[in-house]
Image (cartoon, grey):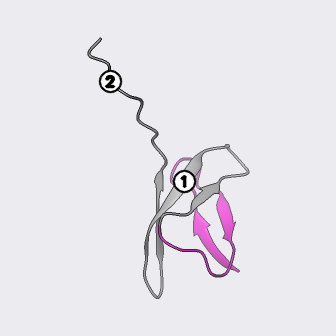
Amino acid sequence: MEKALCPDCDAELKVPNGVVTGEILTCLSCGLELEVSQINKDCMELRELVIEGEDWGE
Protein backbone atom coordinates (compact mmCIF):
# COMPACT_ATOMS: atom_id res chain seq x y z
CA MET A 1 0.00 0.00 0.00
CA GLU A 2 1.36 3.41 -0.99
CA LYS A 3 0.88 6.71 0.80
CA ALA A 4 0.04 10.21 -0.44
CA LEU A 5 -0.94 13.51 1.17
CA CYS A 6 -4.32 15.19 0.80
CA PRO A 7 -3.75 18.55 -0.93
CA ASP A 8 -6.46 20.16 1.20
CA CYS A 9 -5.82 19.03 4.79
CA ASP A 10 -2.39 17.32 4.47
CA ALA A 11 -3.73 14.10 5.96
CA GLU A 12 -1.92 10.94 4.93
CA LEU A 13 -3.95 8.81 2.51
CA LYS A 14 -3.43 5.08 2.23
CA VAL A 15 -3.49 4.30 -1.48
CA PRO A 16 -4.25 0.70 -2.49
CA ASN A 17 -1.71 -1.18 -4.60
CA GLY A 18 -2.51 -1.17 -8.30
CA VAL A 19 -4.17 2.26 -8.32
CA VAL A 20 -4.34 3.72 -11.85
CA THR A 21 -4.53 7.21 -13.33
CA GLY A 22 -8.10 8.52 -13.22
CA GLU A 23 -9.07 6.52 -10.15
CA ILE A 24 -11.02 8.37 -7.44
CA LEU A 25 -9.89 8.36 -3.80
CA THR A 26 -11.58 9.95 -0.79
CA CYS A 27 -9.74 11.59 2.07
CA LEU A 28 -11.07 10.05 5.27
CA SER A 29 -10.05 13.13 7.24
CA CYS A 30 -11.82 15.93 5.33
CA GLY A 31 -14.02 14.00 2.87
CA LEU A 32 -12.49 15.58 -0.24
CA GLU A 33 -12.72 13.43 -3.37
CA LEU A 34 -9.40 13.24 -5.22
CA GLU A 35 -8.50 12.02 -8.68
CA VAL A 36 -5.17 10.31 -9.33
CA SER A 37 -3.84 12.55 -12.10
CA GLN A 38 -0.33 11.17 -12.49
CA ILE A 39 1.73 8.26 -11.20
CA ASN A 40 5.53 8.30 -11.26
CA LYS A 41 7.93 5.79 -9.76
CA ASP A 42 8.48 7.77 -6.57
CA CYS A 43 5.40 10.01 -6.31
CA MET A 44 1.72 10.25 -7.08
CA GLU A 45 -0.10 13.44 -8.02
CA LEU A 46 -3.62 13.95 -6.72
CA ARG A 47 -6.03 16.74 -7.64
CA GLU A 48 -9.43 17.72 -6.34
CA LEU A 49 -12.21 16.01 -8.27
CA VAL A 50 -14.34 18.62 -10.03
CA ILE A 51 -17.61 17.52 -11.56
CA GLU A 52 -18.74 20.09 -14.04
CA GLY A 53 -22.45 20.45 -14.63
CA GLU A 54 -24.01 21.13 -17.97
CA ASP A 55 -24.32 24.72 -19.06
CA TRP A 56 -27.78 25.31 -20.47
CA GLY A 57 -27.00 28.91 -21.38
CA GLU A 58 -28.44 30.29 -18.16
Residue neighbourhood size for the residue with mark 2, other residues' Cα within 10 Å, grouped as few (<14), some (14–19), many (≥20): few
Considering every residue shown, the one lying at the far top of the view is 58
Q: Residue beneath label 1, please?
A: 34
- Residue pictured at 51% horizontal, 57% vertical: 35
Q: Where does residue 29 sit, x and y in percent of width and height?
A: 72, 48
- Residue pictured at 67% horizontal, 81% vertical: 17
> Label 2 amino acid?
Asp
Q: Where does residue 19 sit, x and y in percent of width and height?
A: 59, 75
Q: Is residue 18 left or right of residue 45?
A: right
> Label 1 amino acid?
Leu
From the viewer's perspective, is the residue at label 2 or at label 1 nearer? 2
Q: Which mark is residue 47?
A: none
Total number of numbered discs in the rendering: 2
Nearer the observer, 15 or 19: 19
Q: Is residue 40 above or below residue 46?
A: below
Q: Residue beneath label 2, please?
A: 55
Q: Where does residue 16 sit, x and y in percent of width and height?
A: 69, 74
Q: What range of the chain is rendered magenta?
A: 1-21
Nearer the observer, 57 or 40: 57
Q: Quadrant of the C terminus?
A: top left
Q: What whole-number distance in Å separates the C-alpha atoms at marks 2 and 1? A: 23 Å
Mark 2 and mark 1 residues within 8 Å of each other at the beta carbon = no
Residue 12 among those drawn in magenta? yes
Q: Where does residue 6 sit, x and y in percent of width and height?
A: 57, 56
Residue neighbourhood size for the residue with mark 1, other residues' Cα within 10 Å, grouped as few (<14), some (14–19), many (≥20): many
- Residue pictured at 37% horizontal, 28% vertical: 54
Callout 1: SS? strand
Q: Quadrant of the N terminus?
A: bottom right
Considering every residue shown, the one lying at the far bottom of the view is 41
